[in-house]
Amino acid sequence: MTVNETLGAWSELFMLLAAMTYLVSFVAFAWDMAAHSKALRGTAGTEERELVAAAARAGALDAAEPADARAGHGAGHRGRGYRTGARSALAGHVADEQMRYTGERRPAARVAVAVMVLAFLVHAAAVVSRTFAAGRVPWGNMYEFCTTGALVVAGVYLLALLARDLRFVGTLVSGLVVIMLCAATIGFPTPVGPLQPALQSWWLVIHVSIAVAASGVFTITFAMAVLQLLQARRERAILAGQAPGMDFLRMVPSAQALENLSFRLNAVGFAFWTFTLAAGAIWAEQAWGRYWGWDTKEVWTFVIWVVYAAYMHARATRGWTGTRSAWLSIAGYLCIIFNFTVVNTLFAGLHSYAGV
């Protein structure tokens, strides 16, 4: 067995170990949510009634405001009124508006993060081994796209943890990483091999690395958008004086806090994706002599850019806040999934490098 074959075998072993370790992290994150929710449920009776009463008082204050003032402010003011009531109703949440936890977390959360760091290191060893085995950057086929993309998703999440306590979204992120590694190993197993001629360019490093980084950011915002929708539904139930259910969401910040952070992260991802689109056009001119040719991959890259551009514009200038902005963010990520899976595997074109 040659050195490259040995490195390739070690890469596959490390990838399997990383997937198993991420799975342990996923279980720990889920255990933390379930255990903490159970503890909160034991004290929720009186407290929830107090929260409902607070929400009712907040709603009464909003309703007592003069009609001409409400009309003058329009939909934006109604949104602020709703957020005021929601903050009053959610005063007993474990996480505050800045995503700082006001209550003591159980050890499972700390274990989950530590295990995910270990999984990330093993995962990085797998990707580096694959890189040396192939003698190139590991972005030549679907297997390598999946494994490297999963590494970036985990890395972006762990970096985000340094700035904000985002352990509440760890279950979704670690679960998505496990799915990506399983898809790579089961659906797209590809032996180490050379790059196709069109990919033998430094633009591969520039174009794909930024695209993968953007996808990693969008994965985090997708998870936050899903939680935002669930949290908004729970807030509406509390404001209506109904039993909210979904006790684990008391560990999650308010829908407004999730939306605000998601918007900032989407702005970063959108900037990365804009560069990806421009770099792809420049690379296409060098490889095929034209900047744009309406290839299926090119079209869907542009569609993704349009969806996130619509999200940024609607959120910033048209007042599309709340569930509408969350659904736009989710739609953009679904386009990324479609582009990565269906377009890469089923559509023939100049970008057919899936390796399957």
Image (tube, grey):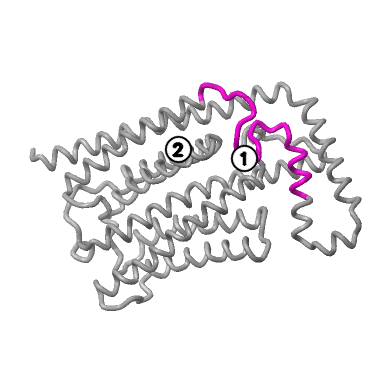
Which element type, helix, strand or loop, lies under badge 1? Answer: loop
Q: Residue at x 43, y 49 (%)?
A: 216
Quadrant of the rendered image containing residue 355: bottom left
Quadrant of the rendered image containing residue 96: top right
Residue 92 in magenta? yes
Specify the amino acid type for callout 2.
Answer: Ser
Q: How many marks?
A: 2
Q: Residue at x 77, y 49 (%)?
A: 82
Across and down, in percent, residue 204 comes to: 27, 60
Per the picture, the main secondary structure of the magenta-coloured stretch is loop
Q: Residue at x 52, y 21 (%)?
A: 107
Across and down, in percent, residue 351 comes to: 30, 65
Specify the amino acid type for callout 1.
Answer: Gln
Quadrant housing the C terminus: bottom left
In space, the residues marked 2 and 1 are separated at their CA atoms by 23 Å
Instruction: Give the magenta-colored segment's residue range.
Output: 82-108
Please give the label number shown on residue 174: 2
Across and down, in percent, residue 115 comes to: 41, 28
Residue 340, above or below 110 = below
Residue closer to the observer: 293 or 277 = 277
Decide if residue 88 is on the left or right side of residue 129: right
Residue closer to the observer: 344 or 257 = 257
Residue 99, above or below 346 = above
| Residue matched to label 1 | 98
